[in-house]
Amino acid sequence: MKDAGFIFGSYIVTLGAILMFTFATLRRAKDSSQSVTEKDKTWL
Amino acid sequence: MKSDSPTRVGKGKVVTAVFLKDIQIELRSRVVTNQVLPFAGLVMVMFAFALDNDDVLQRVAGGLVWLATLFSLFIIVQRSFAIDTADGALDSLRVAGIDLSAVFFGKAIALATKLIALEIVLICSAVLLYRVDVSATGLVLLVTCVLCATSGLAFVGTLYGGLTAGAKGRETLLPLLLLPVVAPVLIAATRATEAAFGSGGAQTSEGWAWIGLLAVFAAVFGVGGSLAFGSLIDE
Amino acid sequence: MSQVLQRTSPTGTRTTKVIGALALLVMAWVVVSGLILTPQDVVQGESVRIMYVHVPSAWIAYLAFIFTAVASASWLISKKHSMGFDRFAGASAEVGVMFMAITLITGSLWGRLTWGEFWQWDPRLTTTAFLFVTYVGYLAVRRLEGSVEQRARRSAVVAMLAVLEIPLVHFSVVLWRSLHQGATVLNPNGDVKMDDLMLFTLFSGVVGFTLVFVWLVLHRQRTMLLVDIANRQGLDAAIAARQTESLVK
């Protein structure tokens, strides 16, 4: 494929950013959820 | 606009009092004249070193005047609100039940006064250092441009200065918030000033369209600022 | 089952799991189809493949900022000042900033291939860049110290000011560029002739990215609530500790 670096690069940037955001969010949720009671988790 | 606050102090009186207070602080401390003005002048000299070409300098003089103004704006705004928060002056005004939009206009007019003094010096230094010429019709355009652009800058400067007042790391946060907002002023004021200077063969008449944009900007943030300022410092 | 789910992801529910699974599925299809199955474009060549991630990111980024503006306005207008609006505005802005960064990066990669330049001073590009910087500033305002209510009020006002700012920036850049006729470059965006599979891939991209957006915002705003509660508990504990301390003395 011509210009493969640019094309794969843009896919890697896109998916990489989404994955990093996802894991950062999940980790932060896990870190701060220990002290929070079930009652405060309004979405359950 | 009628204030529903329980004070008997009229809005005009508050505007004047806040304005006089800020100007008096400046007259006593001389921070703008002794520190910010030399800084802005130095920036103009540094531009000359960086660009190192008489023709280029003459061409971009308008933009450099307004860039130097913006850099100085950050310093003046930070200084003005640092004094207010350090002494709890903003808090006492708030507790006094005063119409905060009047405080906003008072501070904005004081800021505009300082900026205009600064811009006069910067434009003169552009004439001296960068060899630009201003015709009589150009001067009319230039004065209008300075007035309109400065009101816009004073309104957003006061507004975002109030927002970041008292917050940790405000020195770095203020430029980040303010620069994108004042981009239209930089573009419009630069083009209008270039028209007044006749840089790059620009005609004076080309500048007036930009004055309209500057006026709209000032009006939008004048109204928006007077509505928002109270809730930003009210905490 | 729900206990296990709670341990691995405290902000997850059945709904988010379904959305997440769907998002994964659609995104996988977009990658396979965008990179392998679709043909190259007559005008743009292979670089059209970048469009399958670039266009959906841009769409989501703009959508996110509209949501932030609407949620901030709702917070200001509503009598109760419900913190849900504030958390939604914040979560949406965070996800929006990320997608805006993706949009700018993939867009400049595409521009290098198609225009031969990473950046053009085109009004749309410039406004997008300003939108990005403005919301980076918005996120910085959210991180200022203060109570949850202070955060909500400050950031809601800043979001409203951004709504004033962006049209002014756009208009001034349009006016600015219109004076520089020479610099406009042929924009092949409109000339793309897409066949059915290409269109379907682009459409799937929009659907997939929207699902990702919904999933991320749901988790992010719940995480924000958890962090807020944990911070408040930390503060309460510190106050209680001080009180017992002074009682002992």
Image (spheres, rainbow, N blue to C red):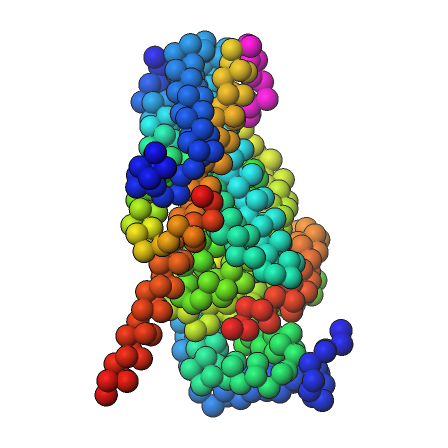
- Quadrant for residue C191, please give it: top right
Residue C117, compared with residue B137, is above or below; it is above
* Most foreground residue, B132 or B169: B169
Residue at 51% from the left image edge and 11% from the top image edge: C197
x%, y% of residue B218? 65, 62
| Residue B164 shown left or right of residue C168 in the figure | left
| Residue B7 shown left or right of residue C57 in the figure | right
x%, y% of residue C136? 44, 51
Residue at 46% from the left image edge and 19% from the top image edge: C48
Residue C30, compared with residue B87, is above or below; it is above
Residue C111 visible in the displayed image: no
Residue at 58% from the left image edge and 54% from the top image edge: C72
Residue C121, compared with residue B231, is above or below; it is above
* Most foreground residue, C83 or A21: C83
- Quadrant for residue A44, please give it: top left
x%, y% of residue C172? 61, 48
In reply to whether residue C242 is colored magenta, the answer given is no
| Residue C177 shown left or right of residue C221 in the figure | right
Q: Which residue, as the protein is rendered here, is positioned at the far right?
A: B2
Residue at 47% from the left image edge and 84% from the top image edge: B88
x%, y% of residue C89? 52, 50
Number of marks drawn: 0
Residue C193 visible in the displayed image: yes
* Most foreground residue, B169 or A36: A36
Which residues make up the magenta segment? C187-196
